[in-house]
Image (cartoon, rainbow, N blue to C red):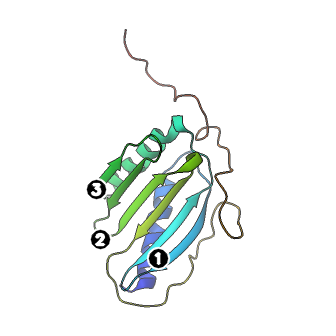
Amino acid sequence: MDMQGAAERADGMFYATVGAIKPEIEWVHDATTTGSCDVTRYWTVMTTVSEQRRGNFLGVVERFWKASDYRIKMVNPSKDLPAITAVSPDGFGILVTIGYKGQAFFEVTSPCVDKSEVAEPAKAANGRMYEGEKPLPNVHSDFWSAESPVPGPTPSS
């Protein structure tokens, strides 16, 4: 596999992951970086993920990754900057983290591959385009941005 193939594989991993998140979130492409033999793709989620819904968001992602045979390497339960890191069966690292103001970020890094040019992602982002730096999350979701707990069973008295 060369760097372009690795970038396409990274894109596919990301698209599959966000495809599992319901209701849908808005995201945009961010940077692509290359090392001496690896490629990393980055994406920024523009949908605000409220503090009350971060556990749900990360739970959906973690369950999808486990169902995809990814090995969970690290779960950071931090209240301020929670994150999950996993590795796919073919050695690609994938990370989701939730940062300031509930903005989620994804990144996928390839294992060492053959050097080649790397094109921009072929698939258009599902969010609006931004020039320069991405703003803080600015898309409201009735579910992901809600500040009330997710309804569910109540603890027994």
Which part of the image, by quadrant, shows the N terminus?
bottom left
- Residue at 29%, 70% in the rendered image: 91
Q: Position of residue 62 (x, y in %)?
A: 38, 49
Whole-number angstrom distance, CA of label 3 to CA of label 1: 23 Å
Q: Position of residue 128 (x, y in %)?
A: 71, 62
**Which quarter of the picture shows residue 90?**
bottom left
Whole-number angstrom distance, CA of label 1 to CA of label 2: 14 Å
Q: In the image shown, does 108 or 132 lie closer to the viewer?
A: 132
Say few, some or many: other residues with alpha carbon within 10 Å of mark 1 (under 14 / 14 to 19 / 20 or more). some
Say few, some or many: other residues with alpha carbon within 10 Å of mark 3 (under 14 / 14 to 19 / 20 or more). few
Element type at mark 3: strand
- The amino acid type, in three-letter code, at marker 1 is Glu
- Residue at 39%, 86% in the rendered image: 2
Tags 2 and 3 touching, CB below 8 Å: no
Which numbered marker is on residue 153?
A: none
Q: Position of residue 58 (x, y in %)?
A: 44, 46
**Which quarter of the picture shows residue 123?**
bottom right
Element type at mark 1: helix
Sequence-earlier tag: 2 or 3: 3
- The amino acid type, in three-letter code, at marker 3 is Lys
Whole-number angstrom distance, CA of label 2 to CA of label 3: 15 Å
Q: Which residue is mark 2?
A: 90
Front: mark 2 or 3: 3
Front: mark 3 or 1: 3
Say few, some or many: other residues with alpha carbon within 10 Å of mark 2 (under 14 / 14 to 19 / 20 or more). few
Q: Which residue is mark 3?
A: 73
Indicate left or right for 90 with 102 as reference. Answer: left
Q: Which residue is mark 1?
A: 8
Sequence-earlier tag: 1 or 2: 1
Which part of the image, by quadrant, shows the C terminus?
top left
Tags 1 and 2 touching, CB below 8 Å: no
Sequence-earlier tag: 3 or 1: 1
